[in-house]
Amino acid sequence: MVSKDGIEICAGFIYETSAPALAWIEFVVANFEVKDRGLRKEALNFLITELSTIAENMGKKYLYTNLKNQGLVERYKDCGYVVGSKGCVEMVKVIS
C-alpha cells in the first residue's frame, strides 16, 4: 500500500504461483477520493515498481498481470511492462 500524509492512495498484491519463476501482480487499486491525478499516477508507478522489485527479490523472473483499465495499462507500461495480448475473455466456474 502507498500512502501520503495518512491517506491511502493505492494498493496491490503479489501472488506466488506453482511455477518457481512466475509471480502474478494483481488487484492494483487506487483511491479515487484522491483527486490529484498526478499524485495517483506517481503513487501507482511507485507501487508497481516496488511490487516488481519485491517479486524479483523473491527470485521471480516473469511477472504477469491481467488488466482492463486503460489508465492502469499505461501505468504498467511506464514501469517496463509490455502488452502480451488484447481482448481477453475472463471466465469462471462456480462449483456448488
Image (spheres, rainbow, N blue to C red):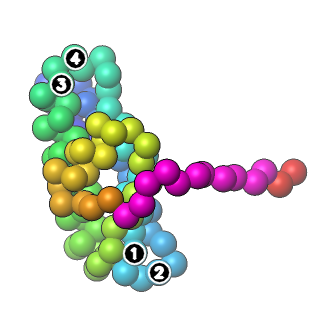
Residue 22 shows which numbered tag? Answer: 1
Question: Are there few (<14), some (14-19), or many (20+) residues within 10 Å of tag 2?
Answer: few
| Residue interval drawn in magenta | 84-94
Residue 76 in view (yes/no): yes
Front residue of 61 and 66 = 66
- Judging from the image, what secondary structure is the residue with disc 1 in? strand
> Which residue is the site of mark 4?
35
Q: Is residue 26 above or below residue 9?
A: below
Amino acid at dot 3: Arg
Question: Are there few (<14), some (14-19), or many (20+) residues within 10 Å of tag 4?
Answer: few
Q: Nearer the viewer, mark 2 or mark 3?
A: 3
- Reading the chain from its start, which is encountered first: label 2 or label 4? 2
Amino acid at dot 1: Leu
Q: Residue at x 37, y 64 (%)?
A: 84
Badges 4 and 1: C-beta atoms under 8 Å apart? Answer: no
Residue 37 shows which numbered tag? Answer: 3
Q: Nearer the viewer, mark 3 or mark 1?
A: 3
- Reading the chain from its start, which is encountered first: label 4 or label 1? 1
3D distance between C-alphas at marks 4 and 3: 6 Å
Residue 48 shows which numbered tag? Answer: none
3D distance between C-alphas at marks 2 and 4: 39 Å
Q: Residue at x 39, y 69 (%)?
A: 23
3D distance between C-alphas at marks 2 and 1: 5 Å
